[in-house]
Image (spheres, rainbow, N blue to C red):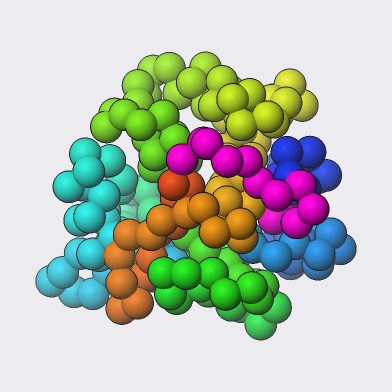
């Protein structure tokens, strides 16, 4: 988990339980928490609108299954989505899910993910999977965040999610999806940085 104030890293912790993450966010008075996991499960027989809209923009994402499919998967592939569900639940009282296109100023959690962030900011339909570590480090540098303390791709991705939270708070994010299937929020561009006086 990474917490930013503007472009300064306030917290960078690799292993935390959802409850510990919540305490850390409250400690720093975080306003918005970007989570790299689906905020809604798919309904049987239909996918999520957000994922279809991203696909039309040539932005790939893993298709979210139903909750039952995730739990019954023999490969354990969807375990990261189930872990994300635990984070949303742990945060729900203090940081309810943003189930709207616009941020209205209260504490919220919201869904985002680093590949879509990178595609949005870099203005390209595809970003190389082989070069994602290099490209995402450069992306952080471009928006003014020093990537040197971030020693893993997970930390870099967490910083991108935190930066996107700042963009959301500042009103510089766009959304895909609908209330029924959940929204995915990404930064609208890299042209304006987070307001350094607001925490995200």
Residue stretch rendered in magenta on the structure? 189-200
Q: Quadrant of residue 177 in the image?
A: bottom left
What predominant SS class does the magenta segment belong to?
loop
Please tell me which residue is depicted at 35% across the width and 26% down the height of the picture. 127
Does 115 appear in magenta? Answer: no
Residue 27 figure quarter: bottom right
Picture mark count: 0
Spot occupied by residue 51 in the image (x, y as percentages of width and height): 26, 55
- Is residue 164 visible in the rendered structure shown here? yes
Name the one closer to the observer, 116 or 122: 122
Residue at (35%, 31%) from the top-left corner?
A: 123
Q: Is residue 59 left or right of residue 175?
A: left
Choose between 113 and 77: the one closer to the eye: 113
- The residue sitting at the left extreme is 45
What residue is rendered at 65% in x and 76% in y? 106
Residue 161, image x and y in percent?
Answer: 57, 47
* Residue closer to the observer: 72 or 104: 104
Residue 107 vs 56, above or below: the answer is below
Q: Residue 165's spot in the image, x, y percent?
A: 60, 54
Instruction: Name the residue: 54% across, 27% down.
Output: 139
Q: Residue furthest front?
A: 192
* Up-down relation of residue 110 to residue 104 (above or below): above
Q: Quarter of the image containing the C terminus?
A: bottom right
């Amino acid at each position: 988990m990474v917490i930013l104030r503007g472009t300064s890293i306030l917290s960078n912790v690799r292993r935390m339980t959802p409850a510990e993450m919540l305490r850390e966010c409250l400690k720093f008075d975080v306003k918005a928490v970007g989570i790299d996991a689906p905020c809604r499960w798919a309904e049987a027989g239909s996918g999520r609108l957000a994922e279809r809209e991203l696909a039309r923009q040539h932005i790939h994402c893993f298709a979210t299954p139903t909750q039952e499919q995730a739990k019954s998967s023999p490969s354990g592939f969807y375990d990261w989505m189930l872990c994300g569900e635990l984070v949303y639940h742990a945060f729900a009282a203090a940081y309810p899910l943003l189930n709207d296109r616009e941020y209205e100023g209260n504490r919220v959690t919201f869904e985002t993910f680093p590949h879509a962030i990178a595609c949005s900011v870099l203005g390209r339909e595809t970003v190389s999977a082989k070069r994602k570590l290099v490209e995402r480090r450069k992306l952080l540098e471009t928006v003014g965040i020093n990537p040197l303390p971030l020693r893993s791709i997970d930390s870099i991705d967490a910083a991108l999610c935190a930066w996107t939270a700042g963009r959301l708070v500042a009103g510089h994010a766009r959304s895909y999806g609908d209330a029924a299937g959940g929204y995915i929020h990404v930064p609208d561009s890299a042209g304006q940085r987070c307001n350094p006086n607001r925490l995200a």
